[in-house]
Image (cartoon, rainbow, N blue to C red):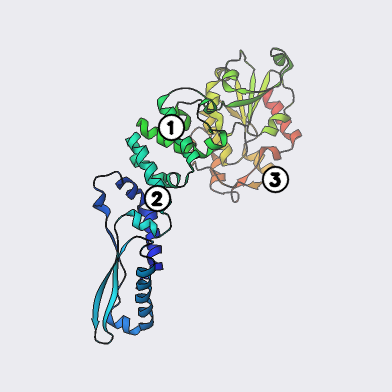
Amino acid sequence: MKFPDDIKDIIKRKIINKRWEWLKMSVSENRQALWPLEINLDIPTEKDAFRQQETARKWIAAWESWQVGHASQVGGVLVQTERRWHSLGAQTVPQKLILNGPEDAVSWTGESEAWSRAIERFKALVQRWSALIDVLPGYYSVLADSDDANFIRITGMVSWICANPGSALYPRQIPVAGVDSKWLESNKGLVCELVSAIQGTDERDFFKACGLKPQPQLIRMRILDMKLRSRFGGLGDICTPWEEIAALDFKPACVFIVENLQTGLAFEDLDNSVVIMALGYGVDVLGRIPWLSHTRCIYWGDIDTHGFAILNRARTYLPSLETVLMDEQTLFAHRDLWVQEKKQSTSSELPLLTDKEQEVFLSLKNNAWGQQVRLEQERIRWDTAWKVIQDIQAGI
């Protein structure tokens, strides 16, 4: 026996599971394919009704009360039927509830206003861009719950991008009011998917899909040699877009690439050397700097699975990239400084590692030395590390 409250819960679940179909059906000529929706109210058998007489009476009374007091407020038609039971006599009982459309369904959950708003916006957008018919249902909450100002920003942004593909502007330059950095961060996934659908692509990068210019990738580099610094007006600590680093007329003898910013800042002067800091997985940029391929490059990262994954990635662009302080000897010499890597790299194979590096990586990955062992580079005493760096730079 399903009571009105039970039906409300059932309808809530159906709305969550089916509203994308209902939205699409709103612009279809075959709207009746999904409707009416019938929900059985589970009439008990005579035996069950006799055994649960009090519950059966409450069930019948609840639906009679609903029909008198609530049927005008929520949608649906209650269908009743007669049962002639020997033990209980003739009884008129509720049989099923018939919902004739999504409007009937959402009225049960108090979402009629939101549904109407979603339908209105869905129809308007699909009429303008038919390609959005399969995408927009996934953004029901945007259609239903966005205030008018925010929805205008969304449609304004999409409209401008579609009218100006490949503008190569920064998002801040787009003439749509209210599109600030915080708004963009919250909505760029939506805008990207809508634009991609309209353009008939599956591009998932917001800037590529929208033809916009991303924030420049900055490289932090320190020039460790006084003579080299004099060529740049004495500048020794540079943070600038990678394009400007790439364009330097520059050929140091040795380039250190370190994962940790504080480690890079601790480097002291070294002849004909520079240090590049804190790229993380952004090491792809190294392949865009031509002068790096003509010099000796040395990578120092954490001894953990991510450190080796970054190293492997960097070697895609710098095949002869060396390492320092990332070996088993260094790891075990600092056993008292080990910490746990919170989440290991998902990579299971790193083909660009040397045999010895591969052994360390797989031992870490397989927890051969303990659970998710990690030695962060900045935990190694600086005087110890600096001596090793000086020796390797000198070719010892």
Specify the amino acid type for callout 2.
Answer: Trp
Is 153 above or below relative to 69? above
Whether residue 30 is visible to the viewer of this picture, yes or no, is: yes
Camera-near label (3 vs 2) is 2
Closer-to-camera residue (94/39): 94
Q: Is residue 269 left or right of residue 366?
A: right
Camera-near label (1 vs 2) is 2
Q: Residue at x 55, y 25 (%)?
A: 286
Q: Are marks 3 and 1 in contact (CB under 8 Å)?
A: no
Q: Which residue is mark 3?
A: 337
Q: Which residue is mark 2?
A: 115
Specify the amino acid type for callout 1.
Answer: Val
Q: Are marks 3 and 2 in contact (CB under 8 Å)?
A: no
Mark 3 element type: helix
Residue 158, which numbered label?
Answer: 1
Specify the amino acid type for callout 3.
Answer: Leu
Is 36 above or below relative to 52? above
Closer-to-camera residue (249/8): 8
Q: Quadrant of the N terminus?
A: bottom left
